[in-house]
Image (cartoon, rainbow, N blue to C red):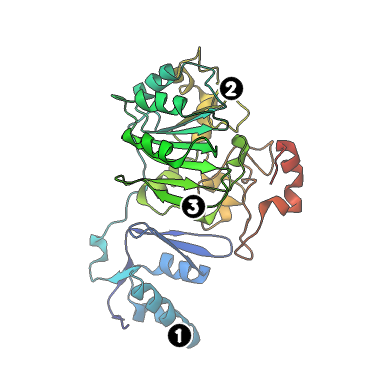
Amino acid sequence: MSYPENIPFKLFANCKLTAGKNFSTISDLENQGIQPIPNSLLTVLQENQGMSISEIKKLYTPDESTILDSYFSFLFENDYIFFTTSPEQFPEIEETWYAPEAIFSAIMDFRYEPSYDVIKVLNELSVLQCKHIQLRFFEIEDLTAVEHILKSLDGSTIISVDVLMPHKDSIIFDNLSYLFKYPRLSGITVFNAEKEETKSVEGKIATIDYSVSKINNCSSCGKIDQRYFTATINFYTESKNFNTCLNRKISIDENGLIKNCPSMIESYGHASNTNLHDVIVQGEFLKYWHIRKQEIKKCNECAFRNACSDCRAYLEDPTDIYSAPLKCGFKPESQNWEEWFNDPEKKRAIAYYNLEN
């Protein structure tokens, strides 16, 4: 596909560049794709926007011009760039992030029955304008507690609920499907299942996912995986300004302790006698919201950092809140994903957190 060499080029505003140590990326925030690129192409894009390709070629040798041709063909064919005689009329997307909610999402962990007044907590979350909650049951006898919570959400600000629970022979698919009569239920994941399977719920735009993952407690969370990468404007701008895992989030662990994340050590009172509003105004609680990926060791050199969820609960150095996520197996040097649990450099931290693979 040919492109005009005498008209200035410009990167589409929804295509964002992230520089890495060994390679960089273009995040297409409209089509939600992430494209690795060589750092040499990043330099061309950063230093020469607003110039025509013929002008740019004058800055390089003939051999380098051949490489430039391949670069611009790739960019043009994939709709990363366009050509215009008025590049100044196409401003960049502002990289600010704002949400009106004091708390946007919450995690509530349970082992059998709750150890606190769940309705009290749900009411407090609604006051904080919370939109999403995740209910995680590590042990469960029946669906009574789940249904009790779903029934209690009428009139609340919560718009979606995800439920995670272990496989139990007495809780069949039809029992789970019945729960979708509650409109705020968005999905159910059943772990410790016999096989990986996704089943659609008749008459609903919803699925029940069965997973063979062995989960016994909250220590299973925090894994960094490219399957979880997100390339949207909201996620990208939040990543540039806040921590994408903990920002506007609050959690209650299976013992009723209020935390940033159930896996974290620090707690800020018990849900039975502490108001959630009193927690989210504390500086110690809020500090994790502001740990951006560009401030985290290893992440600040990773080209995927603005699409990655992060984890502050399990760290390569447990004494440093800016340490890299322990459960990340990505190797920027080789651009390969390896099993994090087998990394000899992580053994001390794995022992510290008493983790199992």
Task: Give the mark, 1 or 2, whose residue is nearer the N terminus.
Answer: 1
Question: Is mark 1 in CB contact (under 8 Å) with mark 2?
Answer: no
The residue singled out by tag 2 in the image is 255
Label 3: element kind = strand
Tell me if residue 41 comes above or below residue 61 in the rendering: above
Q: Amino acid at mark 3?
A: Glu
Q: Nearer the viewer, mark 1 or mark 3?
A: 3
Residue lying at the far top in this picture: please name it. 273
Q: Which mark is residue 333?
A: none
Question: Which residue corresponds to mark 1?
Answer: 66
Q: Residues within 10 Å of mark 1 (few under 14, many from 20)?
A: few
SS at circle 2: loop
Q: Position of residue 341 (x, y in %)?
A: 69, 50
Q: Residue at x 67, y 52 (%)?
A: 340
Circles 1 and 3, Cβ within 8 Å, touching? The answer is no
Q: Nearer the viewer, mark 1 or mark 2?
A: 2
Distance from disc 1 to disc 2, alpha carbons, whole Å, reads 63 Å
Seen in the picture, residue 251 relative to 32 is either above or below; the reply is: above
Please say if 30 is above or below 172: below
Q: Quadrant of residue 140?
A: top right
Which amino acid type is shown beneath numbered disc 2?
Asn
Q: How many C-alpha atoms fall within 10 Å of the one at disc 3: few (<14), some, or many (≥20)?
A: few
The secondary structure type at the circle numbered 1 is helix
Mark 3 / mark 2, whichever is N-terminal: 3
Q: Residue at the location (29% across, 73% down)? A: 8
Left or right of 223? Residue 9 is: left
Labelled disc at residue 197: 3
- Please provide percent x and percent y for residue 108: 49, 29
Badge 1 amino acid: Thr
Depth check: 305 or 151 in front? 151
Label whose residue precedes the other's in the sequence (1 or 3) = 1
Residue 36 percent coordinates (x, y):
49, 66
